């Protein structure tokens, strides 16, 4: 009978607990820094112990599995290491206990969209697949039902990758690397090196797909022993996929093959062309035909919280881009609305990002109006003033910002009300999904006659 301790009882921890309880030969205990605040404490029955007790008795366990959002320098994980108790985060544990083919997607922006496009491309080609990971479905939630012939498409965060030496999929995709999670990693270089773990441990017969337009991705080709393919929005590549003359193309062995014209794609915007190129390379390596890929890209459905166009009220289009938790993501969103009057809603929890590019970049300065909200509102206002930007208002909560933005745009004759916060949601909401849902709720309130 093996004794396992689960550290962290939120979404992935609860899913893991459910999975392990279904296995014979395991005795499972759980602990959480804030166990009393859990709404589903009863789910864990009498298996919970305090964190201090867990630290004191950690050598009694055969394995510790922790939620990826828990930092590696937590006292419990340090104690386990000192006592030579094996420790894995939830994603690592599931990765090691799943025999299926795996495609892992990471990056600062676009990794969820790219993961879901890959899933759709594979299904369009008749290839059985399961999407898990950082996109909102814990790996452990699906682990028991995954079949050996399934392809697992997993979105992988820097938290999951940090210090990991065991994540080695058949295909790894890196969408881009830009500043993010400095509050967690401490520096951009530490964050970049965490992302690099997706490439370091690939086997020689694996495939690494890199963004040729992102200088921060270049070094990954030097740290891997796998084959490297690249995708590019701006130039032709010899081995990979690229965009040219209004079309997406495969390129290999000196030959090119058209995938689809961008005007025929369901998803719009330059960033989505990049996402589609990366996804197409992954799907093709698994066995999808180019014709199947084209059909899937033509029919792909809009993803919630990612430049999600809701509806228009009195000439104001509501767009939910709550997933844009970085400056880089917000800049991509603004490019998609360069020909419309734009009111941009910015704010939330401070992850340590620098907001200068929002106000000094030419793409953002065309915004007609800004509304700053949440914990970061004063920092955003100071940065705007630094660059001579004064066409903004400051509100305490997102709800205030939404109503104010709608009012400003209706007075101006209509336009786009874009929630693309450049910040995490933790000051007001549990996650970006909850924030996005609230934005949709507020928009519907305004829509009511």
Image: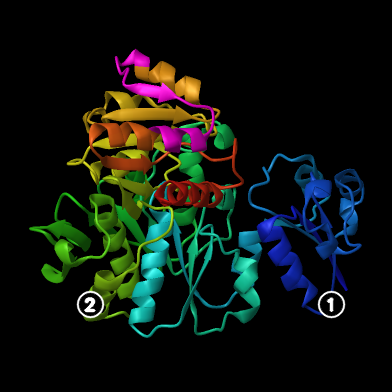
| Residue ID at (31%, 21%) | 391
| Residue ID at (40%, 35%) | 345
392 vs 240: above or below: above
SS for callout 1: loop
| Residue ID at (49%, 20%) | 378
Residues marked 1 and 2 touching at CB (< 8 Å) = no
Question: Which mark is first along the chain, 2 or 1?
Answer: 1
Q: Is residue 53 left or right of residue 272?
A: right
98 vs 181: above or below: below
User: Looking at the rendering, which quadrant does residue 111 occupy?
Assistant: bottom left
Q: Which residues are magenta?
A: 385-404
In reply to whether residue 398 is colored magenta, the answer given is: yes
**Residue 138: numbered disc:** none
Where in the figure is residue 285, as x and y percent of width and height? 33, 74
Q: CA distance from mark 1 to mark 2?
A: 46 Å
| Residue ID at (79%, 40%) | 75
């Amino acid at each position: 009978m093996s004794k396992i301790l689960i550290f962290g009882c939120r979404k992935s921890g609860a899913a893991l607990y459910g999975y392990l309880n279904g296995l014979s030969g395991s005795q499972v205990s759980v602990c959480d820094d804030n166990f009393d605040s859990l709404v589903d404490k009863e789910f864990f029955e009498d298996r919970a112990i305090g964190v201090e007790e867990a630290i004191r008795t950690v050598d009694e366990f055969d394995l510790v599995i922790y939620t990826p959002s828990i930092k590696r320098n937590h006292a419990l994980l340090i104690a386990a290491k000192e006592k030579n108790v094996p420790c894995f985060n939830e994603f690592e544990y599931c990765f090691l206990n799943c025999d299926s083919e795996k495609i892992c997607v990471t990056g600062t922006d676009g990794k969820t969209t790219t993961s879901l496009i890959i899933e759709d491309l594979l299904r369009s080609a008749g290839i059985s697949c399961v999407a898990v990971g950082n996109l909102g479905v814990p790996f452990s939630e699906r682990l028991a039902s995954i079949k050996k012939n399934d392809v697992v498409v997993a979105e992988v965060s820097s938290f999951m990758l940090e210090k990991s030496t065991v994540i080695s999929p058949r295909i790894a995709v890196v969408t881009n690397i830009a500043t993010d999670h400095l509050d967690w990693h401490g520096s951009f270089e530490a964050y970049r090196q965490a992302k690099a773990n997706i490439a370091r441990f690939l086997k020689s017969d694996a495939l690494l797909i890199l963004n040729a337009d992102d200088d921060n991705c270049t070094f990954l080709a030097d740290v891997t022993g796998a084959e490297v393919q690249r995708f590019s929005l701006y130039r032709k590549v010899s081995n990979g996929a690229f965009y040219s003359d209004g079309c997406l193309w495969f390129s290999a062995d000196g030959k090119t093959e058209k995938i689809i014209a961008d005007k025929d794609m369901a998803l719009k915007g330059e960033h989505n062309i990049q996402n589609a190129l990366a996804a197409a390379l992954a799907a093709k390596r698994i066995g999808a035909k180019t014709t199947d890929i084209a059909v899937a890209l033509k029919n792909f459905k809009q993803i919630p919280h990612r430049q999600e166009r809701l509806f228009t009220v009195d000439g104001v289009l509501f767009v939910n881009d709550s997933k844009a938790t970085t400056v880089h993501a917000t800049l991509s969103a603004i490019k998609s609305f360069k020909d419309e009057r734009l009111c941009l809603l910015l704010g939330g929890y401070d992850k340590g990002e620098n907001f200068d590019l929002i106000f000094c970049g030419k793409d953002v300065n065309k915004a007609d109006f800004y509304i700053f909200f949440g914990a970061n509102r004063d920092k955003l206002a100071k940065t705007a003033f630094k660059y001579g930007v004064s066409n903004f208002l400051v509100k305490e909560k997102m709800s205030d910002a939404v109503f104010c933005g709608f009012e400003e745009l209706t007075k101006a004759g209509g336009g786009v009300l874009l929630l693309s916060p450049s910040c995490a949601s933790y000051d007001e909401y549990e996650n970006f999904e909850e924030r996005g849902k609230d934005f949709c709720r507020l928009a519907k309130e305004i829509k009511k006659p």
